[in-house]
Amino acid sequence: MAKKVKGSSKGSSKGSGKGSGGNEWADHLTQRAKVENYPARSVYKLEEIQKKFKVIVPGSQVLDLGCAPGSWLLYAAKQVGSKGRVFGIDLKPIEIKLPDNVIAIQDNILSLENDEFLKKGFGAVLSDMAPATTGRKDVDAFRSFELCSMALETAKKFGAPNSNFVCKIFQGNEFKKFEREVKSVFRECKTFKPESCRKQSKEIYIIGKGKK
């Protein structure tokens, strides 16, 4: 059964590359996130995406897949405002205090298809999910592709007509295949690497706008 998490005052970190980095830019963003009360620097990736593509609409409902440690939840909550709602799902618990318009559930997205809130149409489905890396780029890229495919299926099932999609993927052999799949679902498909990504990272974001 899904566990709903209201959150606590304690912060956390995620083992998918969202912590402090080894370069000055990463350190700067990590410190900035602490000052601005975000649990991870990944919030600035979503901020860049939102400013450029306007994927989150005020008053809408947003679904955040792989939401721990919660930075994207907090940012999305500000974007939708008091009339909107943000729902997050992650295998890990959310250990931060969440706004009133946010609900986080500790569970696997695959087991939540019959959950009541997932029956509603979401204006945006966001995925910052990343696999536990092995050090083998081909293996890591394929595992990333599998997570992205799951995120896209979720967007197809639960995204409202004309909804938007944001998905992080590691660049590899399956990248073009996934890009084609996104193009088949959304009227617009863009690739974007935020400046806040670490330069050595192979991650890139695919943005789908206007679900068909």
Image (cartoon, grey):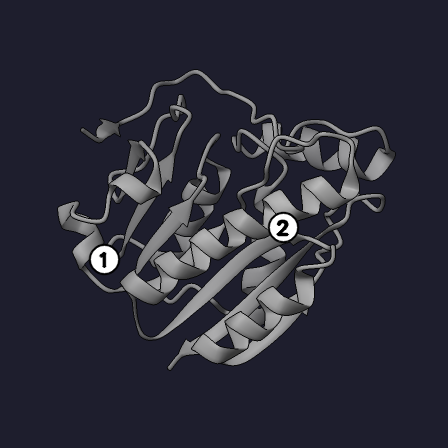
Residue 57 in the image: above or below residue 9: below
Q: In which quarter of the image is residue 212?
A: bottom left
Dot 2: what SS?
helix
Foreground of the two, 131 or 48? 131
Expressed as whole percent of the image width and height from the top left, the position of residue 108 reads 34, 36
Q: Is residue 55 left or right of residue 205?
A: left
How many numbered circles are shown? 2
Q: Residue at x 67, y 59 (%)?
A: 174
Q: Quadrant of residue 20?
A: top right
* Residue 3 seen in this snapshot: yes
| Residue identifier under label 2 | 45
| Residue identifier under label 1 | 83
Expressed as whole percent of the image width and height from the top left, the position of residue 70 reads 45, 34
Residue 157 tag number:
none
Q: Which residue is drawn at 16% across and 48% down?
A: 114
Q: Residue at x 31, y 37 (%)?
A: 99
Residue 154 in the image: above or below residue 77: below
Of the residues under marks 2 and 1, which one precedes in the sequence?
2
Q: Distance between the residues labelled 2 and 1?
A: 24 Å
Dot 1: what SS?
loop
Foreground of the two, 191 or 154? 154
Q: Residue at x 59, y 65 (%)?
A: 178
Q: Is residue 177 left or right of residue 184?
A: right
Expressed as whole percent of the image width and height from the top left, the position of residue 37 reads 52, 30
Instruction: Residue type at mark 1: give it.
Output: Lys
Expressed as whole percent of the image width and height from the top left, the position of residue 34 reads 60, 27
